[in-house]
Amino acid sequence: MNTDELIKKLSSDASAVSPRALEKRMALGGVSGVFVSAAIVILWLGFHPDFETAAISSAFLIKMAYTAALAVGAVAARVHLMRPDAKPAVWFAFPVIPFALLGLLAMAELAGAPREDWASIALGQSVAACIVRISIISVPVFLGLLVAARRLAPTRLRAAGAAIGFASGSLAAGLYALHCIESSASFIFLWYSLAIALAAAIGAIVAPLFLRW
């Protein structure tokens, strides 16, 4: 049997694949994880004590806009990197835009406050809790995306893992915002970003162990 005959034989039973199969699989994994993470937030932490008022505040809108923008970029990168011919550089540049915009807003916030208040503005009341809780909340989303990715064909495993971690961290930060009492742009810029970056770093380390062909 020559090579052409072997290829024909191997492909004879292959069924057609939906052109959006990759996106559907990743969406299913992500949505499943988000539901579990949302349940964790509701049952464990609960909503902001004054949620109705907080939900229309500029601080809340900034949190949601920032985490949503990061999540959109991370999800696009994640889907792209599940393909064997993926090139990650362009997709990882997108989060720079919301990060830079929030950084400018944080600088303006500090510039308009007395220097002696900078530490309290940036540190808030819940730095450690913020980082730990976002990390915990991100786990179900990370696992959902990781399980979905195992049936796909990424070749840049660390980049794919970082994208999965980045997406799970961004979505978890958005869910945590439903509970978070912090209101400064500086806090969001520093500690939400750090928690998301940690999730991306963990994804880059852990995910390749499960994504290898």
Image (tube, rainbow, N blue to C red):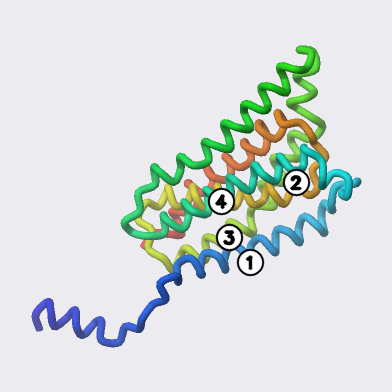
For the residues labelled 4 and 1, the Cα–Cα distance comes to: 17 Å
**Mark closer to the chain start, 1 or 3:** 1
Q: Quadrant of residue 15?
A: bottom left
Q: Residue at x 48, y 54 (%)?
A: 78
Q: Quadrant of the C terminus?
A: bottom left
Instruction: Return the residue nearer the eye: 63 or 205.
Output: 63
Q: Residue at x 87, y 48 (%)?
A: 51
Instruction: Return the residue nearer the eye: 98 or 160.
Output: 98
For the residues labelled 2 and 4, the Cα–Cα distance comes to: 17 Å
Q: Residue at x 52, y 60 (%)?
A: 146
- Residue underneath mark 1: 32
For the residues labelled 2 and 1, the Cα–Cα distance comes to: 19 Å
- Residue underneath mark 2: 177
Secondary structure of the residue carrying numbered label 4: helix
Q: Which amino acid type is marked by label 1?
A: Ser
For the residues labelled 1 and 3, the Cα–Cα distance comes to: 10 Å
Q: Which amino acid type is marked by label 2?
A: Ala
**Rendering coords of residue 162 (x, y %):** 49, 47
Q: Residue at x 41, y 66 (%)?
A: 152
**Mark closer to the chain start, 2 or 3:** 3
The dot on residue 143 is 3
